[in-house]
Amino acid sequence: MKRYRWLLFVFIIGILSACQNKERIMEKNISVKLKEQIDNPHGFKFVSMQIEKTFSVAERKEIITEDKLLEVAHLFGESDILNQYRTEFNFLQAQTDESSDAVYYVQCIIEEVNDQGTRTNIYDVTVLNDAHLSVMYIH
């Protein structure tokens, strides 16, 4: 019986470590992307980050379709938006487990420092659950 408890303990620790590691990678990737968008890329820090919603591969395949990809290409031509759609579309097509996580909607509270002082902003971020946890959108 003690052996099973030990195995269960090791399993739980492994799961918790994997989740924390995923969140650290997300935070790092979001930071890199935010630095491209804000006025003072060195004057910000994360206050908090929370995964608000997780979408499965099946759910995202209903939204990111080949027709939608063609529509975005028609509307925006070669653009960052089209590249983001293509990236997600290709990722989804390669997935075999329809119930696995595909996309995370993450809310970040960021403290930004500039000449006028410190302000707190809330960003909604879409993260693709690929090997790199790619940041798709920041609003």
Image: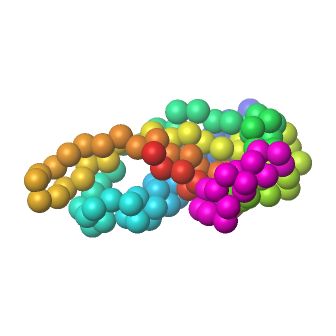
Which color scheme does this rendered protein use?
Answer: rainbow
Q: Position of residue 83 (x, y in %)?
A: 67, 62
Q: Position of residue 137 (x, y in %)?
A: 54, 51
Which residue is situated farthest in the right direction here? 96
Q: Is residue 130 magenta?
A: no
Which residue is situated farthest in the left direction here? 116
Q: Please give the range of residues in magenta.
A: 66-81
Q: Residue at x 67, y 61 (%)?
A: 77
User: From what the image shows, is residue 80 above or below residue 123?
Assistant: below
Q: Residue at x 50, y 60 (%)?
A: 29
Q: Is residue 56 left or right of residue 43?
A: right
Q: Quadrant of residue 67?
A: top right
Q: Is residue 32 left or right of residue 130?
A: left
Q: Residue at x 32, y 47 (%)?
A: 110
Q: Residue at x 28, y 62 (%)?
A: 39
Give the number of marks. Answer: 0
Task: Name the foreground residue: 13 vs 135.
Answer: 135
Q: Is residue 79 magenta?
A: yes
Q: Position of residue 133 (x, y in %)?
A: 61, 57
**Residue 23 visible to an observer of this rendering:** no
Magenta segment, prevailing SS (helix, strand or loop): helix
Q: On the rendered image, what quadrant is the C terminus found in? A: top left
Which residue is situated farthest in the front direction here? 74
**Residue 46 visible to an observer of this rendering:** yes
Task: Name the foreground residue: 51 vs 92.
Answer: 92
